[in-house]
Image (cartoon, rainbow, N blue to C red):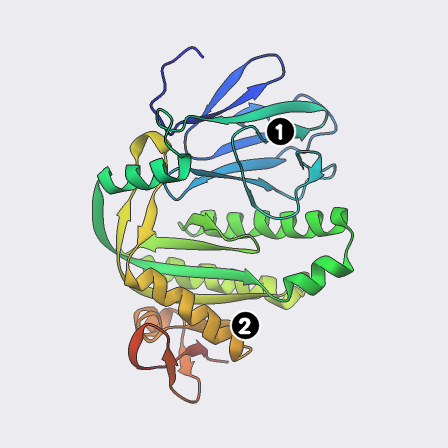
Amino acid sequence: MSEALPPGSAWLESSEGERTTLRGNCSLGRSSGNTIVVRSDRASRQHATIHAQDGGEYWIIDLGSSNGTLLNDVRVSLPTRLRAGDRLQIAGFTWVFRQLDGAGTDSEAFAESMMTIAEIRQARCWLLIADVQEFTPLSQRLSPEELAGLMGGWVRACREILAAHGGTLNKYLGDGFLAYWREAAGTSTKVAGAIADFQLMQTKKDLEFRLVLHRGQVALGGASNLGEESLMGPEVNYVFRLEKLAGSLKTQCAFSSAAAEGLGSALPTRPLDGEHELKGFSGFHRLFVPRT
């Protein structure tokens, strides 16, 4: 490797021995704007991406490519965490994922220790979870190729909506993701615009998914050499609890009280009937939905 990398760093190694250091997100595809340009007509322009998250995890995501992305000879249909030694294949090209483990330390334990020494900042954020509904029956009904194309197309469209409205995709969750906006002047308008675009996607029924939005104070931390930022704290746990509640209530789009208040006139809401207990949180809690 041409540069000395600190422990915890990761890279892709091609079959020719060329190494590409992974910092933050790494895009792969035929377009010249990709981090790794795949020079083949069998590769899509935006074929796949590798996403850094949680202080040292790297996930491979196929973006709905025509010919697929193989991980250890199996087609990628969901965002999947990479492990040292994993082999990626796109359009006949092969790379091996490598990651330093901190001088013999288990890589997951090392990643956790990196987070403890990273700078921790407090910020008010909008937190959004998007989660595909009934994924298991869907995966049983579709072929691997159909499932990969459907999920990859959904991820690509969601990424485009977030980028258009200033949001950041923070963490993939297998069949969903966590995204966020830092609170600033005009953020509620951006969030409302993203929700409106996501709701338009929902009406097309290509893939049924749920949206849950919350707003609160979180801790942001990340090791700078890993090129990513992690979200921590009770408010992050809270939005995940709300997502489970929304699922039990069969609600496709739901907001916490704090999110509904923050949206104001940018996206009018109404409360759902009833108050609910949330595991790990005291008192009773309400959900709000877009006013129709």
- To which residue does mark 1 refer? 87
Label 1 crowding class (10 Å Cα cut-off): few <14, some 14-19, many 20+? some
Front residue of 44/82: it is: 82
Of tags 2 and 1, the one toward the viewer is 1
- Place of residue 56 in the rendered image (x, y in percent of width and height, measured from the top left): 40, 37
Residue 32 can be seen in this image: no
Residue 53's quadrant in the figure? top left
Above or below, 238 relative to 177 = below
Quadrant location of the N terminus in the rendered image? top left
- To which residue does mark 2 refer? 252
Q: Is residue 248 left or right of residue 112?
A: right
- Place of residue 84 in the rendered image (x, y in percent of width and height, measured from the top left): 52, 30
Residue 209's quadrant in the figure? bottom right
Whole-number angstrom distance, CA of label 2 to CA of label 1: 37 Å
Q: Is residue 5 left or right of residue 1?
A: left
Q: Residue at x 21, y 40 (%)?
A: 119
Above or below, 125 relative to 103 = below
* Secondary-structure class at tag 1: strand
Front residue of 173/254: it is: 173
- Place of residue 97 in the rendered image (x, y in percent of width and height, measured from the top left): 54, 27
Q: Is residue 189 left or right of residue 122?
A: right
Looking at numbered disc 2 in the image, what kind of residue is underneath it? Gln
* Secondary-structure class at tag 2: loop
